């Protein structure tokens, strides 16, 4: 498989985590969003929308949109499962994932932030305020749900799909200096995930296209 990726793209970050959790090997192909490589004619032949991630499977399947990619991976490679087995629990787990994917991530996407600072002319302080507002609004509703867990992770003794969605947003929150002091359960979940191979290898500072000044071994 090939995964077209940008090192700090939240959507791609969650795919890297999920591939790691499932133990799947893949080739990472960097696409520099800041340099607008996603808008080149060459890349649009891979993904007509001009976005990352794109997953190209060995059998010719080519998929964009991270949620669709993750659902396909879950069906194509069901073991280990990243959702609970029981129908209602699976729906509730998926709802948590979509809260991150639909209610936080799109509002803090690079395209949106560029529009705020560029077309709308907002300054950095306004940008920070915008970013923090949406993170804190949704984290406030996620916090009690995670605090109520009776186990270390959402799938008991191992992380599931929700962790793949959440951890990239915690990384982003820290990058934008968002105060996370009111979300101790989310921060603790992030800390439990951090040393696991799937999360460690997927971290933005450990990618082939990570800038040298951010690179970690």
Image (spheres, rainbow, N blue to C red):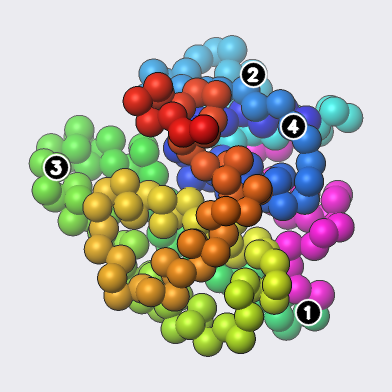
Q: What residue is pinned by disc 2?
A: 45
Reply yes or no: does residue 72 show up in magenta. yes
Residue visible at 48% across and 51% down? 168
What kind of element bears circle 1?
A: helix
Measure the C-alpha gap from mark 3 to mark 4: 37 Å
Q: Earlier in the sequence, mark 3 or mark 4?
A: 4
Residue visible at 85% across and 57% down? 78
Measure the C-alpha gap from mark 3 to mark 2: 35 Å
Q: Is residue 87 left or right of residue 110?
A: right
Q: Which mark is residue 26?
A: 4
Q: Local crowd at mark 2 within 10 Å, few (<14), some, or many (≥20)?
A: few
Measure the C-alpha gap from mark 3 to mark 1: 44 Å
Segment colored magenta: 62-85
Q: What residue is pinned by disc 1?
A: 87
The answer, for residue 49, to whether it is visible in the render is no
Measure the C-alpha gap from mark 2 to mark 1: 38 Å
Return the residue nearer the eye: 81 or 114: 81
Residue 1 x/y as whole percent: 78, 30
């Amino acid at each position: 498989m090939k995964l077209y990726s940008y090192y700090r793209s939240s959507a791609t970050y969650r795919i890297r985590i999920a591939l790691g959790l499932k133990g799947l090997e893949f080739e990472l192909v960097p696409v520099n969003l800041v340099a607008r490589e996603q808008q080149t004619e060459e890349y649009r032949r891979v993904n007509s929308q001009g976005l990352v991630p794109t997953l190209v499977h060995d059998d010719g399947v080519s998929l964009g949109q991270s949620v669709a990619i993750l659902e396909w991976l879950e069906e194509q490679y069901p073991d280990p499962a990243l959702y609970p087995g029981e129908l209602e629990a699976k729906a509730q787990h998926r709802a948590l994932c979509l809260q991150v994917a639909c209610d936080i991530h799109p509002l803090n996407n690079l395209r949106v932030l560029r529009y705020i600072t560029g077309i709308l002319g907002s300054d950095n302080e306004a940008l920070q305020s915008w970013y923090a507002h949406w993170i804190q609004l949704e984290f406030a509703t996620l916090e009690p749900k995670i605090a109520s867990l009776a186990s270390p992770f959402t799938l008991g003794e191992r992380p599931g799909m929700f962790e793949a969605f959440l951890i990239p947003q915690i990384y982003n929150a820290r990058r934008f200096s968002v105060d996370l002091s009111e979300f101790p359960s989310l921060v603790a979940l992030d800390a439990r995930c951090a040393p696991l191979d799937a999360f460690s290898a997927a971290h933005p500072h450990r990618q082939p296209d990570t800038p040298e000044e951010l690179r970690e071994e």
